[in-house]
Image (cartoon, rainbow, N blue to C red):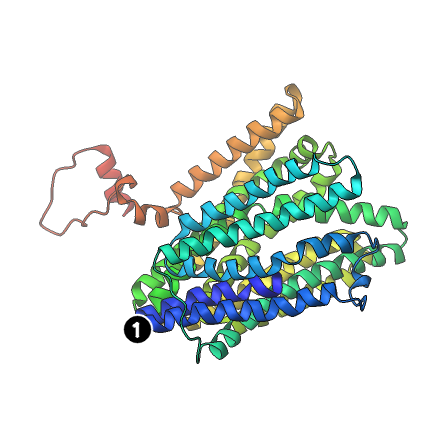
């Protein structure tokens, strides 16, 4: 699914917007058709490989009972690959509601079908097979609904002539990035425990500590990526449209807002994890030791957020090769950290590697973005002030935790302190003007509207203390 469904839909949406901005609507339909045929061309050989008797993929599973389950689900690769292209066409037409509803219904069908089918048998092996059929049914469902909606909304399939090569060139780097991410995660799971064992940990302890970091701490650290990923999804057609229609002022504004929003979200959460990361981990996992990894990894959120949003923006601006390069630069640094640093840092080498990875990726992406945008976006001041607000917010959190921890259970300390710290961070952001990107879209919410400065010889009455204060400050 990573190979067939990662790069193609994003590229289809971007190419659609490019052709629509040039009033080449026939090429829009040809691009969608090319994407569908390309997805089928890639998925069919993979399906045949699974069904072959060669045993080529046996090495993937330590338990051979997994292969029949994969064989049950694998025909769904065609359905979900074609659906991914249709999904890209929805993005290109700004039909995000339809996409969201279909995704939600797919998960619902998988859940309901799984409950019904698994309860039809009492045999564990057959139950697992039934769960595989539930996945297959959900893929078929989303494909069918998306196809019907596509044609109802006037979608057409036309000759894909001359669209294959541009589609492959643009989608290949994105697909390579997504595929490499999956492979590197697997590589991390092999290398890090092995290096920990070589420096004195037992095999079981190494796997346990790795599981705490990768499986328990990192899902919390990656929380901002959910919101930022949603923003990135909506930005792809918007930025592509700005770029190809040469609306550079709007492009600059959207890039700035996206970066500022990403910083705002991450800097709202970082102080919470720095202050009460241990209590949150104790509340969620009944394991306070995970909190040490959460606290250390909290600072990963800012470069992670910037990396995610800038990668998406560059992909929408036809800079897929550059994002692939930035990915490999960051990933290479992370692998080196994982290999050499466990001797000094233990399992924390992974967290340090992640920080360096996303920091390098973010810096590289921001540099390319500045060169790509005809009107350079301004965000450095916002980044600096956002990072600064983390310090007083974290100190405020430590103060609060010291009070609540004496009288309240862990879960009350975690929940109440998290809310109060976030509110304090939000207040600081407002005071320092770090949420002006939101007021630009909702000017009626702005308390202090921009006033003309007083001119010499043209004095006016001060209507209030607020007016006077505003005059002095500006």
Q: Quadrant of residue 357?
A: bottom right
Q: Is residue 22 left or right of residue 114?
A: left
* Residue drawn at the location 37% of the way across and 66% of the way down: 17
Q: Nearer the viewer, residue 420 or 211?
A: 211
Q: Which SS class for mark 1?
A: loop
Where residue 367 appears, as percent x and y from the top left, is 49, 69
Does residue 378 show up? no
Q: Is residue 408 left or right of residue 269?
A: right
Q: How many marks?
A: 1
* Residue drawn at the location 43% of the way across and 54% of the way down: 148
Residue lying at the far left of the rendered structure: 457
Question: What residue is disc 1 on?
Answer: 22
Where residue 271 appears, as percent x and y from the top left, is 56, 41
- Residue 213, placed above or below residue 400: below
* Residue drawn at the location 76% of the way across and 46% of the way down: 211
Residue lying at the far front of the rendered structure: 120
Q: Nearer the viewer, residue 174 or 154?
A: 154
Q: Quadrant of residue 449?
A: top left
Dividing the image into 4 quarters, which one contains the N terminus?
bottom right
Where residue 431 appears, as percent x and y from the top left, is 39, 41
Q: Quadrant of residue 464?
A: top left
Q: Is residue 269 left or right of residue 277?
A: left
- Residue 398, placed above or below residue 44: above
Where residue 299 appears, as percent x and y from the top left, is 60, 50
Does residue 313 show up? yes
Q: Is residue 271 left or right of residue 47?
A: left
**Mark 1 Cα shell of 10 Å, populated few (<14), some (14-19), many (≥20):** few
Q: Nearer the viewer, residue 280 or 137?
A: 137
């Amino acid at each position: 699914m990573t190979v067939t469904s990662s790069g193609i839909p994003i590229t289809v949406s971007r190419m659609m917007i490019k052709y629509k901005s040039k009033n080449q609507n026939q090429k829009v339909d040809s691009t969608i058709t090319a994407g569908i045929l390309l997805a089928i061309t890639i998925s069919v050989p993979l399906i045949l490989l699974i069904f072959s008797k060669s045993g080529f993929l046996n090495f993937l599973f330590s338990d051979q009972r997994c292969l029949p389950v994969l064989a049950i689900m694998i025909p769904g690769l065609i359905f979900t690959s074609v659906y991914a292209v249709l999904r890209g066409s929805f993005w290109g037409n700004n039909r995000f509601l339809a996409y969201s509803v279909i995704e939600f219904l797919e998960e619902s069908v998988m859940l309901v079908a799984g409950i019904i089918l698994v309860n039809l048998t009492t045999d564990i092996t057959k139950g697992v097979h039934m769960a595989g059929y539930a996945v297959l049914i959900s893929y078929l469902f989303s494909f069918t609904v998306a196809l019907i909606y596509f044609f109802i909304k006037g979608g057409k399939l036309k000759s894909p002539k001359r669209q294959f090569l541009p589609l492959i060139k643009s989608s290949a780097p994105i697909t390579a990035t997504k595929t490499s991410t999956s492979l590197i995660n697997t590589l991390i799971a092999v290398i890090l425990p092995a290096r920990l064992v070589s420096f004195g940990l037992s095999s079981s302890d190494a796997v346990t500590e790795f599981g705490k970091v990768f499986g328990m701490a990192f899902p919390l650290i990656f929380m901002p990526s959910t919101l930022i990923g949603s923003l990135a999804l909506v930005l792809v057609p918007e930025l592509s449209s700005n770029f190809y229609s040469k609306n550079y002022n709007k492009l600059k504004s959207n890039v700035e807002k996206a970066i500022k929003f990403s910083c705002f979200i991450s800097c709202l959460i970082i102080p919470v994890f720095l202050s009460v990361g241990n209590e949150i981990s104790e509340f969620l996992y009944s394991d306070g030791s995970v909190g040490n990894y959460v606290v250390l990894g909290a600072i990963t959120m800012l470069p992670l957020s910037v990396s995610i949003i800038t990668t998406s923006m560059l992909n929408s601006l036809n800079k897929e090769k550059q994002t692939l390069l930035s990915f490999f630069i960051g990933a290479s640094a992370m692998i080196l950290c994982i290999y050499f640093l466990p001797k000094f840092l233990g399992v924390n080498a992974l967290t340090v590697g992640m920080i360096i990875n996303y920091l390098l990726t973010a810096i590289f992406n921001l540099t390319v973005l500045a060169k790509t945008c005809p009107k350079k976006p301004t965000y450095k001041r916002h980044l600096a002030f956002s990072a600064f607000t983390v310090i007083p917010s974290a100190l405020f959190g430590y103060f609060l935790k010291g009070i609540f921890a004496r009288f309240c259970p862990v879960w009350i300390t975690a929940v109440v302190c998290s809310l109060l710290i976030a509110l304090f961070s939000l207040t600081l952001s407002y005071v320092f003007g770090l949420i002006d990107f939101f007021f630009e879209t909702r000017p009626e919410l702005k308390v202090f509207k921009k006033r003309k400065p007083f001119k010499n010889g043209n004095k006016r009455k001060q209507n209030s203390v607020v007016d006077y204060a505003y005059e002095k400050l500006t």
